[in-house]
RNA sequence: GGCGACGUGGCCAAGCGGUAAGGCAGAGGUCUGCAAAACCUCCAUUCACCGGUUCAAAUCCGGUCGUCGCCUCCA
């Protein structure tokens, strides 16, 4: 099997064939840095991070371009509200963006152009469109003449008549057709502006992606990604601009990620349920969100989000790290050459093929969790081997599994943390979520230890039961010490 | 109104014509002073509903009901 990609334009899952053998050029719409990132951004960039990493895993030389739309109405408005210079606000939010993305383990793209530093190529493209009769200038504005592009609507599958009938477009007398959109906006007082053949002004919303992708990837490239909501009008307009200017088909595969719903409701400002991911990271480890976004639904489908689902993801990721810790300790204890039959040979033999098969299926992180689950299960089984004569073989098998997991993690990027450190942070966050006093818990555990040493089982059990009511679960270790962890409160099961 | 997506066990979610993955929760077991963790076993004769095509359909076609998204800034 080889990589297949669901393409929005054709509506089909097609075998992936890059334009140029061995190379992939991909473009993903970046953020408009006017505020901190929310869950929707996290989903989008985690999804395409997986795409990027998997293509590299397959051996492609990937060029990944993701822009910053740092000149925009929203930035200008927000900056004015805060009495700031627009570019300073953009810079501030770009830095915050990196903070959030880094925490999520998202690799930096190869090229990250900004509108503010791409004005030359934007103006050039607008000029080309004007020259070709696809755009017209009015009073310092330049609009795209939608009627002149016969294929307008081909991505979002809308006919021209339908769009006009249902259009809720603000009245603008300068436009020849209500569907026409701005390529260049004449400067207003106090706004960022650049010189142009049409007077001072700034780029419209959609043109930057066309200009940047052409500049950094060429007129035609392989993959273009973004959120579902961008299909219309943003990507539709992008196609009109790019293909109008270059005269050739621009994108081979269009990838669109689904939305994040909060408790089955659309995330929106009016509902007040737009979560900044930096706020979420106060309560959950960033990797929990990454794992959740990869494993809970295919990237094209909607994903529902709430604390119960995140708790489940947190628990699962902790299980993975617990298994890694146990597996690595076990392997270290029996670090010797071993030749001979191995336990769990089937899991070892099939892991990579299963992982690839999952990812080959339109980058299905959900399916990729299957072989992963089996590998961790086998790891735990091996590390629990008690018979001494079987341990060298088990340790060898565990070592192989750890290698395989590390390979898959080049794509998933979930297990790079130190298990010890991760689990401590995980527990601290879980304790905080339940409002637990960590020191008090430790004190109670010490009390129980004394009771146990005196074999006062009733007293020891009473303390454990009391802690259990708070969600604290105790684990007595063979060496006499006691580990503890916190269980998140489960959703009450419906009758 | 137009375009599109979706409806699978208590919950989440794969499935893309060949006889229902996986995770969570639940039940039983091994282990343990008792536990927990880990591991093992069990847990949908059935895929919103009704027709149709087929040797064969959760999967294809038609219809009904329901949920949601886009059409306006939005990942």
Image: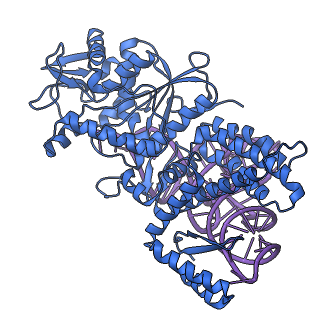
- Residue drawn at (27%, 36%) of the image: A91
- Classify A344 as above or below B48: above
Within the image, what quadrant is residue A462 found in? bottom right
| The N terminus of chain A: image quadrant | top right
Outermost left residue: A189
Colour of chain A, in one word, is blue
Whole-percent x and y of residue A140? Answer: 14, 20
- The reply to whether residue A108 is visible in this rendering is yes
Residue in the picture at 26% in, 16% down: A123
Residue sitting at 52 percent across and 69 percent down?
A488
Image height of B5 relative to A5, above or below = below
Foreground pick, A348 / A400: A400
Location of residue A92 in the rendering, given as x and y in whole percent from the top left corner: 27, 40
Q: Quadrant of residue A479?
A: bottom right
* Chain coloured purple in this rendering: B
Q: Nearer the viewer, residue A377 or A426?
A: A426
**Percent coordinates x, y for residue A178 in the rendering:** 24, 29
Image-quadrant location for residue A24: top right
Q: How is the image coloured?
A: by chain
């Amino acid at each position: 099997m080889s990589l297949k990609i669901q393409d929005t334009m054709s509506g089909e899952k097609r075998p992936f064939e890059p334009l140029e053998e061995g190379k992939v050029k991909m473009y993903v719409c970046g953020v408009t840095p006017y505020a901190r990132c929310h869950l929707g951004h996290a989903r989008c960039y985690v999804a395409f991070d997986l795409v990027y990493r998997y293509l590299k895993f397959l051996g492609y030389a990937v060029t990944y371009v993701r822009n910053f739309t740092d000149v925009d109405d929203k930035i200008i408005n927000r900056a004015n509200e805060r009495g700031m210079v627009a570019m300073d606000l953009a810079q501030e939010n770009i830095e915050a963006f990196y903070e959030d993305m880094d925490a999520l383990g998202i690799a930096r793209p190869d090229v990250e152009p900004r509108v503010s530093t791409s004005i030359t190529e934007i103006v050039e493209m607008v000029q080309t469109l004007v020259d070709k009769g696809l755009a017209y200038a009015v009073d310092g504005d330049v609009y795209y003449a939608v009627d002149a592009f016969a294929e307008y609507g081909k991505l979002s599958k809308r006919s021209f008549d339908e769009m006009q009938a249902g259009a809720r477009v603000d009245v603008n007398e300068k436009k020849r057709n209500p569907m026409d959109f701005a390529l260049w906006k004449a400067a207003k007082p106090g706004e960022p502006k650049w010189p142009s053949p049409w007077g001072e002004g700034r780029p419209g919303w959609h043109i930057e992606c066309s200009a940047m992708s052409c500049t950094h990837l060429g007129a035609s490239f392989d993959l273009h990604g973004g959120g579902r909501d961008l299909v219309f009008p943003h990507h539709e307009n992008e196609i009109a601009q790019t293909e109008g200017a270059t005269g050739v088909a621009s994108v081979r595969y269009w990838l669109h990620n689904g939305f994040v719903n909060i408790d089955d409701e659309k995330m929106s400002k009016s509902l007040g349920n737009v979560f900044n991911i930096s706020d979420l990271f106060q309560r959950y480890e960033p990797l929990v969100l990454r794992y959740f976004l990869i494993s809970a639904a295919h990237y094209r489908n909607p994903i529902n989000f709430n604390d119960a689902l995140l708790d489940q993801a947190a628990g699962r990721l902790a299980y993975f790290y617990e298994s890694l810790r146990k597996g690595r300790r076990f392997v270290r204890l029996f670090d010797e050459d071993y030749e001979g039959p191995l336990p769990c040979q089937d899991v070892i033999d099939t892991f990579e093929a299963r992982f690839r098969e999952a990812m080959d299926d339109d980058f299905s992180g959900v399916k990729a969790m299957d072989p992963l689950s089996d590998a961790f299960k086998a790891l735990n089984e091996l590390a629990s081997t008690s018979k001494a004569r079987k341990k060298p073989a088990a340790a060898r098998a565990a070592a192989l599994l750890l290698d395989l997991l590390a390979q898959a993690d080049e794509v998933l990027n979930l297990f790079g943390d130190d298990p010890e450190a991760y689990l401590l942070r995980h527990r601290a966050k879980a304790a905080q979520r339940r409002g637990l006093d960590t020191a008090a818990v430790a004190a109670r555990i010490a009390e129980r230890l004394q009771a146990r040493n005196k074999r006062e089982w009733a007293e020891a059990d009473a303390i454990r039961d009391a802690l259990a009511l708070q969600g604290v679960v105790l684990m007595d270790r063979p060496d006499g010490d006691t580990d503890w962890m916190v269980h998140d409160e489960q959703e009450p099961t419906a009758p």
